[in-house]
């Protein structure tokens, strides 16, 4: 399997430099190649695509690339390489008793994840590795063979940090002394702060607010991701989240990112205007939950995620259970080209049927 597409190596693509027609030319070509590759290499995926009477010549646009529901990765082990080629197994987060997704990575897919993530992060923090403060405990990354979503996130973003420090003890309490020592050591330098949205809120922001203490992280860049569901009870929206972070941490550069373990590497980063952006290596399509038809820009529906990274498993086109809408294309005030969008919630207490039923039939 090659990384080569119509525009040469996909890792040479411009991160946010392609406008719609130009991007679709190269991105569509690679998506078509991956669809055919996975049909040949993954019998379960081929069965799904075959049952919906899909033909290769039908792929005339990104909207016509076949997709599978993300839930399938919790029901079946889907892979397009031999078991001997798997070097990592990643799992999604899930509450007790729930099935978790299993994502199988070979060397090529793992390397692509690293390279693409590095390009996306360089757009936000620059090319140099920064002193890094992780809002989690060190025990989270202890198992290097079986990756949870948290483990994968921390280790993935840690590639862009140096002298990495963990803000929490293993009992998830904030070690203020350790954090202040780290901040003092790197005073006057930009610092990368990383954590999952709720972890940053619960174990850092709220802890500092309740104790009446502050940490001066002026000049730091906070990258956070993971969903907002656990913040609903606190009635916290993204704007208030940023304001309260600024109040106790003095961090002005706060970037949320959207992504999922089923497409690790091809994350959607929030720009300075609060918009999530698709990079050259990914895109989103919004579909009506009733019939899966494509929604117009501005309309709300299910988020379909496309990525050119997955080679070892058929995860290049998946229908999530998240609700969102496209805000625009190629015209964000931040001047990044491509699709930009918003996530507005999650499909509650419902399964996406259709492809799932086909798979189990």
Image (cartoon, grey):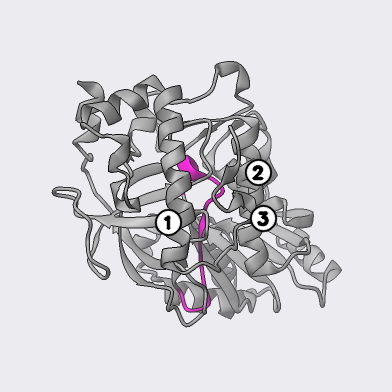
- The disc at residue 304 is none
- Magenta-span inclusion, residue 344: no
Looking at this view, is 207 or 161 the one in front?
Answer: 161
User: Nearest the camera: 199 or 329?
Assistant: 329
Instruction: Specify whether 64 is left or right of 254.
Output: left
Residue range in magenta is 260-274
Q: CA distance from mark 3 to mark 2?
A: 29 Å
Q: Secondary structure at mark 3?
A: helix
Quick one: which residue is furthest to the left in this view? 290
Q: Is residue 217 left or right of residue 286?
A: right
Relative image position of residue 299 (x, y in whole percent) = 22, 66
In the depicted structure, whether residue 88 falls above or below residue 57: above
Per the rendering, the mark at residue 170 is: 2
Tell me the mark number nearer the camera, choosing from 1 and 2: 1
Tell me what residue is drawn at x 38 percent, y 56 percent: 284
Above or below residue 170? Residue 215 is below
Whether residue 272 is in magenta: the answer is yes
- Is 108 in front, or is 320? 108
Q: Secondary structure at mark 1?
A: strand
Marks 1 and 3 close (CB-CB < 8 Å): no
Going from the N terminus, do you reach mark 3 or mark 2 first? 3
Residue that numbered label 3 is attached to: 118
Q: Position of residue 13 (x, y in %)?
A: 60, 58
Q: Nearer the viewer, mark 3 or mark 2?
A: 3
Q: Which numbered disc covers residue 283?
A: 1
Give the mark, 1 or 3, whose residue is nearer the N terminus.
Answer: 3
Quick one: which residue is furthest to the bottom in this view?
Answer: 333
> Which secondary structure dominates the residues rendered in magenta?
loop
């Amino acid at each position: 399997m090659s990384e080569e597409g119509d525009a040469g190596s996909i890792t040479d693509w411009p991160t946010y430099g392609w406008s719609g027609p130009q991007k679709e030319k190269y991105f569509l070509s690679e998506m078509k190649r991956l669809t055919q590759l996975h049909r040949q290499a993954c019998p379960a995926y081929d069965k799904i695509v075959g049952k919906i009477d899909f033909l290769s010549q039908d792929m005339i646009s990104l909207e016509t690339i076949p997709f599978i529901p993300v839930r399938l990765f919790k029901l079946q082990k889907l892979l397009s390489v031999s078991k001997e080629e798997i070097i990592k197994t990643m799992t999604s987060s899930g509450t007790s008793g729930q099935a978790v997704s299993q994502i199988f990575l070979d060397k090529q897919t793992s390397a692509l994840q690293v390279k693409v993530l590095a390009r996306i992060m360089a757009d936000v923090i620059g090319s140099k590795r920064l002193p890094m403060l992780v809002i989690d405990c060190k025990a989270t990354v202890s198992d290097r063979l079986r990756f949870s979503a948290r483990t994968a996130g921390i280790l993935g973003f840690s590639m862009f940090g140096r002298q990495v420090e963990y803000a929490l003890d293993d009992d998830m309490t904030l070690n203020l002394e350790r954090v202040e020592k780290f901040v003092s050591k790197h005073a006057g330098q930009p610092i990368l702060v990383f954590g999952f949205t709720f972890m940053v809120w619960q174990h850092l922001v709220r802890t500092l607010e309740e104790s009446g203490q502050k940490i001066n992280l002026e000049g730091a860049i906070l990258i956070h991701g993971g969903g907002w569901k656990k913040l609903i009870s606190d009635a916290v929206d993204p704007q208030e989240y940023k304001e309260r972070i600024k109040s106790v941490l003095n961090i002005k550069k706060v970037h949320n990112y959207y992504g999922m373990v089923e497409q690790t590497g091809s994350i959607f980063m929030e720009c300075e205007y609060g918009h999530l952006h698709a990079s050259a290596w990914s895109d989103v399509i919004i579909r009506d939950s009733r019939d899966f038809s494509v929604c117009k820009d501005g309309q709300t529906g299910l988020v379909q995620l496309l990525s050119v990274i997955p080679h070892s498993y058929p995860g290049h086109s998946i229908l999530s259970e998240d609700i969102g809408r496209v805000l625009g294309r190629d015209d964000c005030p931040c001047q990044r080209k491509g699709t930009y969008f918003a996530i507005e919630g999650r499909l509650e207490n419902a399964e996406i049927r259709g492809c799932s039923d086909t798979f189990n039939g």
